[in-house]
DNA sequence: TTACTACTTTAGAATCATTCTAATTTTCTT
DNA sequence: AAGAAAATTAGAATGATTCTAAAGTAGTAA
């Protein structure tokens, strides 16, 4: 329902967000939170994030990045998107929203939420509840 | 638009379908076509298909299965679905349709097409054309 | 602060789906 | 039946992700 943080985040804010999520504010988690939870809608892979952390002066083990992304996911701070063939992308936009996918590059583009009126939820199979609903429009570059 | 074959397929029909798609009707491709193009809506991974082919008495190299699935895909005989984390599933239902995804198992269930009225396509980014549009409803088993 | 315990990070090995390679086999055409 | 082109194959290679076990760090209580 809600979920945009439209402003950048300081290390202190990052630590606070982590504590609120019951995650110890370690150096590594703070650095990642600063990068990802600044309110911009982004789609990053673990490897892209690693490169970004290197540039930012906070290199860390890839395993740590995977660990943190999973913990952030469980805490509801990011959301995985599995569309393109290869790597999972982590989406920092927590609002229900939709994606264009460039089928050639795997790149994701958010669809302006104002543009889409979702249909009503179909009847769900018994014993299940809906977690997310997402429209995906696969795009190909015109030749 | 169209695409359901609501009846089983014989080796001869399979060969014919392959020829129509400019694919040589080899033993392996025929065996796969018989399994996949019988009109049932299915979602199979390469490994599941291999197991099925073993049961069917037509074991073949996994590389061949991947090759064939790609060729079938290019020929428009099956469609890949990339939702669950791990393996790509090949969908034998070529009609535009939508999926429930069990987030725990990765299993796909077709959504009854009558249940969904798709919204209008949003404005596409310049230079792109839409290839497919798909709604995904992620489900979690109620506790 | 100190000491303790639980939690984190880490490098590197392991895994799993998928792709590649180079050699062998099969199909199609003559 | 023979030759050329295409397909299949086993096994190696790749790439994303996960696991493991050891070393480091944070929170806590005295």
Image (spheres, coloured by chain):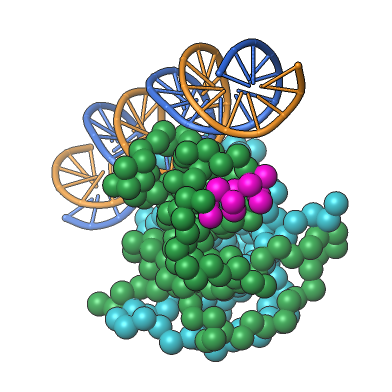
Chain colours: A green, B cyan, C blue, D orange
For residue B11, above or below residue A65: below
Judging depth in this view, the residue of B83 and A4 nearest the camera is A4
Q: How many marks?
A: 0
The x and y percentages for residue A103 are: 39, 65
Residue ID at (36%, 41%)? A58
Q: Is residue B90 left or right of residue C19?
A: right
Q: Name the image quarter holding the N terminus of chain B.
A: bottom right
Residue ID at (25%, 77%)? A143
Q: Does any portion of residue B120 appear in the rendered image?
A: yes
Judging depth in this view, the residue of A139 and D23 nearest the camera is D23
Q: Which residues are magenta?
A: A13-22
The x and y percentages for residue B4 are: 61, 73
Residue ID at (63%, 56%)? A76
Judging depth in this view, the residue of B55 and B134 nearest the camera is B134
Q: Is residue B75 left or right of residue B53?
A: left
* Magenta-drawn stretch contains A65: no
The x and y percentages for residue D26 are: 57, 33
Q: Main secondary structure of the magenta part?
A: helix
Judging depth in this view, the residue of A78 and B100 nearest the camera is A78
Residue ID at (40%, 73%)? A139
For residue B51, above or below residue B23: above
Q: Does any portion of residue B80 appear in the rendered image?
A: no
The x and y percentages for residue C13 are: 44, 18
């Amino acid at each position: 329902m809600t979920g945009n943080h439209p402003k950048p985040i300081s290390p202190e804010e990052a630590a606070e967000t982590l504590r609120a999520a019951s995650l110890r504010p370690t150096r590594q988690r703070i650095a990642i939170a600063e990068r990802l939870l600044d309110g911009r809608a982004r789609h990053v892979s673990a490897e892209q994030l690693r490169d970004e952390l290197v540039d930012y002066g906070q290199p860390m083990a890839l395993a740590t990045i995977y660990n943190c992304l999973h913990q952030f996911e469980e805490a509801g701070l990011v959301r995985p998107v599995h569309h393109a063939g290869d790597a999972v992308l982590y989406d920092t936009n927590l609002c229900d929203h939709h994606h264009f996918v460039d089928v050639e590059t795997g790149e994701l583009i958010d669809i302006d939420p104002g543009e889409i009126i979702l249909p009503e939820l179909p009847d769900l199979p018994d014993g299940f509840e809906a977690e997310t609903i997402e429209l995906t429009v696969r795009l190909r570059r015109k030749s």
